[in-house]
Image (cartoon, grey):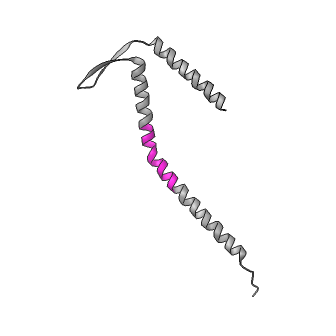
Amino acid sequence: MKLVKLVVGFMLLGLGASFASLNAGTVRLDFYFAVHDVPIALALVVALGAGALLGVLAASGRLVRLRQEAAELRRKARLSAEEISNLRALPIRDH
């Protein structure tokens, strides 16, 4: 599985490099207070990275809540297992 991931990673790296070489032109980015001419590939990589970062930040709140819920459920399951174990250890009394 590691080999497959490595091969896919190199293929994506190769595709990215060929894309960058085929699109070597520049694009003008105007940031109200400054203007920069940057390569198209760099602009796309920065936009992709910013989008990925925003996606991770948007999902992190939900992820934290789910981890807390999972920890609480594990604690409840452990307590239930301990209670069952204690009940099984009690002698059975006939009335």
Q: Residue furthest bottom?
A: 95
Percent across and percent down for residue 23 are 44, 13
Q: Position of residue 20 (x, y in %)?
A: 46, 16
Question: Residue sitting at 67 percent across and 73 percent down?
Answer: 86
**Is 56 in front, or is 89?**
89
Side of 94 where 83 appears, left or right: left
Q: Quadrant of the C terminus?
A: bottom right
Q: Quadrant of residue 29?
A: top left
The quarter of the rendered structure image containing the N terminus is top right
**Residue 26: x %, y % from top left:** 36, 14
When the figure is inspected, residue 95 is found, relative to residue 19, above or below; the finding is below
Using the image, determine if residue 47 lies above or below residue 69.
Answer: above
Residue lying furthest right: 94
Which residue is found at the position 50% from the left and 17% from the top?
17
Residue 34 in the figure: left or right of residue 22: left
Q: Residue furthest left?
A: 33
Q: Is residue 63 magenta?
A: yes
Q: Does residue 57 show up magenta in the picture?
A: yes
Q: Main secondary structure of the magenta part?
A: helix
Q: Residue at x 50, y 19 (%)?
A: 16
Q: From which residue to which does the magenta span run?
A: 54-68
